[in-house]
Image: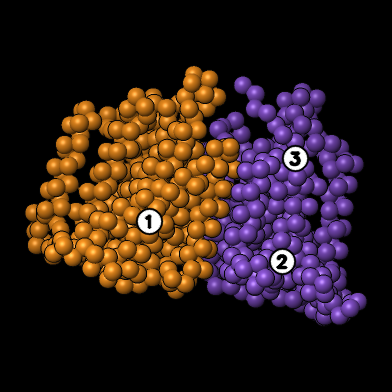
Chain colours: A orange, B purple
Amino acid sequence: MGPRFLLLISVAVMGLVSFLFTGHPELSWPLGQVDDYLLNILILAGINVILAVSLNIVNGHTGQFSLGHAGFMAVGAYGSATLTQINGKVFLADLSFLGNAAPTGLFVLSLLAGGVFAALAGLAVGLPSLRLKGDYLAIVTLGFGEIIRVMIQNTESLGGARGLAGIPPHTSLGWTWGISLLAIYCVGSLVNSTYGRGFLAVRDDEIAAEAMGVNTTRYKVTAFVVGAFFAGLAGALYAHFIGYITPEGFSFLKSVDVVVMVILGGMGSTAGVTVAAIGLTFLNEALREAEQYRMVAFALLLIILMITRPQGLLGGLGRWLPGKGGKP
Amino acid sequence: MNEFLQQLINGLSLGAVYALIALGYTMVYGVLRFINFAHGDVFMVGAFAGMHFGRWLKPFAAAWPEWLFASVVLLGSMLFCAVLGILIERLAYKPLRERPRLTVLITAIGVSLLLEYSGQLIFGAAPRGFPSLITSTSISGLGGLRASNIQLIVLVVTGLLLLGLHLIVMRTRLGLAMRALSLNPTAARLMGVNTNVVISFTFGLGSALAAAGAIFYASLYQAIDPFMGVLPGMKAFVAAVLGGVGSLPGAMVGGLILGVVETLVVGYSKLLGIPPGYRDAVAFVILILILLFKPSGLFGKTQREKV
């Protein structure tokens, strides 16, 4: 399957799903009614897929270790909410030439804004990260995530520690899954392209890659920016899904959630990571009753997995799917 | 001026705690070349161990003088954490010794989460009051300076612990082996250094110091919860980087500097125009600046990567 073919499929599926679900979720499930609860989980799963796939390009394909993904998500969420909630009326007036489509137009703009803001933040994190490796990079990205959180907490115009409520609910299943397919396609074809071999080279042996003329710096920054862009989109979708965001929701633990998805799915395997993100979303819902045991079990799983199967539960699954990675 | 000295005292007692935790990071990095993410949570366990040990000991120790009771609790908690640290290394890190560093890092995050959430499961998520081991009194010094006796005790005992550590590292055979291992692991092994014993010893020593830091921290702030180790742990890591990872004096100085800077930023927030809410961001800003301009830290040696 060539990338163009995949793009066609993605667009077709995206169009179909959007057509089926936008606006009236309860009427459109082909197999009958889909209840709100399942719909919400499906949307959350889609958002998690975007987060996991975008983190995978940094942690999996490029071999860096970022622990600040929630920070980019926060930038996207607050960045988009600035357009639709805080300054919503002004922008809606500006877009009045669109007629009835004005709110949707603003939503699209806010998604883009969220992604672009987050990408800029990714650039800011990526630049100093060039000099650092492994553990140091992990701590610095973690630090950046915390700084972003503290900054939002102390900015009154963004609602401060109280959070920001009343964000218009625009996120539908179509939008979420459309964008997650886009993320899967973009990351997959980026990494599988000739250009993208550079990411894998940086991961496998940075010194050798540099000696062969690969501009490792540029690849690392690109990875950060692309990853942050999609994390920002995910944040924007999340904000317009939940309607109420707080800085606490984007803490270090949220980043860890995404890291767990990437590790379970197998770092560098887009397909594995996608499956893990969907699976973990459903598992989280199923284990809601046993909330306090859930994280203990995840932590144990993480340790045992690293000792016995460091390539992840689903690592190597992606050999015949886009974004194949992992070791052969 | 007076206010400045006052802030300095507060900052130094906080910095002493950071220094104690930072030593654990630095020592482990010295022998194993990896950052033990779970160190901050060993610190948390130290506080809870101290609390429960103190409660259990109280009926037996009714007649003891206060200082004896406090030191027994301190030593008990240090011993408990030393064992915990050694166990963590044996079970989680040792099987990964020759693996890529990323694998070890992820395992360390796993251990950290495991300690945090097991703590939450056992002790509950709500903050608990830490019993005062020593009756707090306020001491007035020259020029109206005030310090609590606990702050002064923390500073003095930290000094003693650091002296003890210095003696262990510089004057004992195990200390010599530790230094040899951090200088060149292969050569040390060839010279007959039992690396497993030395690594266990290092973990035990670092964890014991973290437990001491935890007892001090809990005595100063009197509230403990299962996630209390996350921020002090990360800040202590920053302190270790500031001083130069792998350098013991560096970790001490870095901890003190960080404690003082953090306290001063909060104390003079109006003057500096930084809201006090930014307290927790200070450490990370310092970290990023250090890594940008002097990645080897104040006392660290620059290491060139060899192909």
| CA distance separating discs 3 and 1 | 38 Å
- In the image shown, does B152 or B68 lie closer to the viewer? B152
- Foreground: B63 or B241? B241
Above or below residue A254? Residue A289 is: below
Is residue A289 among what the camera can see?
no
On whether disc 3 and disc 1 are found on a single subunit, the reply is: no
Q: Quadrant of residue A12?
A: top left
Q: Is residue A41 above or below residue A87?
A: above
Residue at 16 percent across and 36 percent down: it is: A8
Q: Residue A97 at x, y = what percent?
A: 16, 62
Q: Tell me the amino acid under the disc marked 3.
A: Gly
> Which quarter of the rendered picture does the C terminus of chain A lie within?
top left
Q: Amino acid at mark 1?
A: Gly
Q: Nearer the viewer, mark 3 or mark 1?
A: 1
Q: Which residue is mark 3?
A: B300
Q: At 63% across and 44% down in the image, what residue appears?
A: B291
- Badge 1 crowding class, 10 Å Cα cut-off, few under 14, some 14 to 19, many 20 or more, is many
Quickly name the residue at label 2.
B264
Q: Is the residue marked by circle 3 packed among few (<14), some (14-19), or many (20+) residues within 10 Å?
A: many
Secondary structure beneath dot 2 equals helix
Kindly report the distance in space between the C-alpha atoms of the residues bearing marks 2 and 1. 33 Å
Q: Image point 83% across, 64% down: which residue?
A: B155
Q: Residues within 10 Å of mark 2 (few under 14, many from 20)?
A: some
